Amino acid sequence: METPNILSFAGSPLVEYPARLATTKSGHIAISDWKRNCVTILNSKGHVETEYFSLSKNRKSDGFCPRGICCDSEGVILVADFSNHRIMLLDETGQTFLAVLTKEDGIHHPWSVGYGNDGLVWVGNKHGEVKIYSLTLPDNGK
């Protein structure tokens, strides 16, 4: 497989600060980009499948601030949204973008996220704390 130069697409940087990466079941790469405040999903050829910036049309309105990122065995993507105190569920098609854990669940400045085959979501925060949540994820993010 030829390794694509993802920094050269469209004549401008596609990824500026690729802090965390995760691979989905279908081989897509999910990139948590701190500088662009987005998650970019690349297909196996290195081309953009979709990008997630915010819940609203106005990208700056909710300040999506992705940090940690992981995938479950079915390809569902979980992202720690630092500034909004939430864990977001995404899919590689661009159809699903919703909060599954929030401040009301005890999420505070999440820094990292991991998902176990046992259905447990592990969330680390900026204060060095790790909390564990039981969460049933929908099949394929739907």
Image: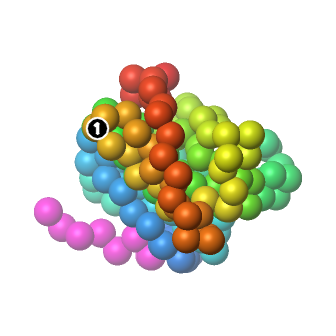
Residue in the image at 57% along x and 55% along y = 80
**Left or right of 31 on screen, residue 37:** right
Decide which of 99, 122 is in the foreground and name it: 122
Q: Amino acid under label 1?
A: Asn
How many numbered markers are drawn? Answer: 1
Q: Which of 80 and 51 lies nearest the eye of the viewer?
A: 80
Q: Is residue 13 visible?
A: no
Q: Is residue 58 left or right of residue 77?
A: right
Q: Which residue is mark 1?
A: 117
The residue positioned 40% from the left and 28% from the top of the image is 140
Characterize the magenta stretch by its predominant secondary structure: loop
| Residue 71 percent coordinates (x, y) | 37, 46
Q: Quadrant of the N terminus?
A: bottom left
Tell me if residue 69 can be seen. Answer: yes
Q: Which residues are magenta?
A: 1-8
Left or right of 15 in this view: 56:
right
Q: Give percent across and percent down for residue 10.
A: 51, 68
Q: Which image quadrant for residue 45?
A: bottom left
Q: Residue at x 61, y 70 (%)?
A: 126
Q: Residues within 10 Å of mark 1 (few under 14, many from 20)?
A: few
**Is the residue 52 above or below the residue 5 in the image?**
above
